Image (spheres, helix red, strand yellow):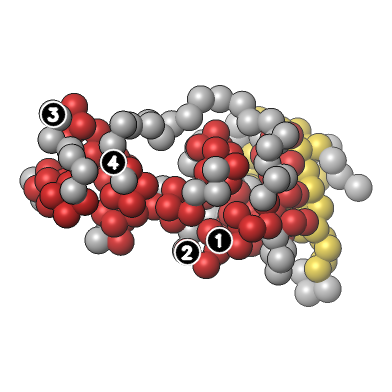
């Protein structure tokens, strides 16, 4: 069983990297955030989880640290009908900000999962139900990236802008700008209109 690989990146695809280690090239499926930081010719190291399939044989999944690997395994083992490929998709979304994902699951905040991380309402609720109580002792390093603003209906406002076609980053920037200007209130409709005025510029 392969547990760790260290070697030269000799090829990259949209979903994987080929790592040359000990004269053998291993194809390793990786989260998108990890792939984005790789280049051919550089050396890299990954914790490895093997997945067996009757169709594809053994597939390798790689992670830059144990934290990512443990969350991948948690998805795969705890969420119903979630294989390795789907678990990697979930991890890719969660890696936008692990501290914020961790907080959303603990707080059972479906709006953050849908509005910020891009999960559908059905999938987000499935994640919350499956991981309830299991993330409390899960260690997550780093600081939150999603600013906690003192804004009424923050999650709802983010989700609404997201459904209107704006990315989570665009929505957050608009809300933060309005907050700095003191232009946010308790009325959702007014907040949306104010945010749209900024986003349309």
What separation in Å lies between label 3 and label 1 (alpha carbons)?
34 Å
Question: For the view shown, which residue lies furthest in the bottom direction?
Answer: 55
Estimate the x, y position of residue 56 in percent, counting from the top left: 77, 69
Which quarter of the figure has residue 40? Answer: top right
Asked whether the residues under the numbered discs 2 and 1 touch, taking CB atoms below 8 Å apart as contact, a structural biologist would say yes
Q: Which residue is mark 1?
A: 125
Q: Which residue is mark 3?
A: 181
Q: Residues within 10 Å of mark 4 (few under 14, many from 20)?
A: some
Estimate the x, y position of residue 150 in percent, counting from the top left: 31, 31
Q: Is residue 29 visible?
A: no
Q: Which residue is mark 2?
A: 121
Q: Any mark on residue 133, and which?
A: none
What separation in Å lies between label 1 and label 4 (alpha carbons)?
23 Å
Q: Earlier in the sequence, mark 3 or mark 1?
A: 1
Query: Is 65 placed left or right of 127 in the picture?
Result: right
What residue is at 12 percent from the left and 46 percent from the top? 194
Q: Earlier in the sequence, mark 1 or mark 4?
A: 1
Q: Which residue is mark 4?
A: 152
Q: Nearer the viewer, residue 156 or 143?
A: 156
Estimate the x, y position of residue 69 in percent, counting from the top left: 72, 42
Asked whether the residues under the numbered discs 3 and 1 touch, taking CB atoms below 8 Å apart as contact, a structural biologist would say no
Q: Earlier in the sequence, mark 3 or mark 4?
A: 4
Query: Is 193 placed left or right of 79 in the picture?
Result: left
Q: Residues within 10 Å of mark 3 (few under 14, many from 20)?
A: few
Q: Earlier in the sequence, mark 2 or mark 3?
A: 2
């Amino acid at each position: 069983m392969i547990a760790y690989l260290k070697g030269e990146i000799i090829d990259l695809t949209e979903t994987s990297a080929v790592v040359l280690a000990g004269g053998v090239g291993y194809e390793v499926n990786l989260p998108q955030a990890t792939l984005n930081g790789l280049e051919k010719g550089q050396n890299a190291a990954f914790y490895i989880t093997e997945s067996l399939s009757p169709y594809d044989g053994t597939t390798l999944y790689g992670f830059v640290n144990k934290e990512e690997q443990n969350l991948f395994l948690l998805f795969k083992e705890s969420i119903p009908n979630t294989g390795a490929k789907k678990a990697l998709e979930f991890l890719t979304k969660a890696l936008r900000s692990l501290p914020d994902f961790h907080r959303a699951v603990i707080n059972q905040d479906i709006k953050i999962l849908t509005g910020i991380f891009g999960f559908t309402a059905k999938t987000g609720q499935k994640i919350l139900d499956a991981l309830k109580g299991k993330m409390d002792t899960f260690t997550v390093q780093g600081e939150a990236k999603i600013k906690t603003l003192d804004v009424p209906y923050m999650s709802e406002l983010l989700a609404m802008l997201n459904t209107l076609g704006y990315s989570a980053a665009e929505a957050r920037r608009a809300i933060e700008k309005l907050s700095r200007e003191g232009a946010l209130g308790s009325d959702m409709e007014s907040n949306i209109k104010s945010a749209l005025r900024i986003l349309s510029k």
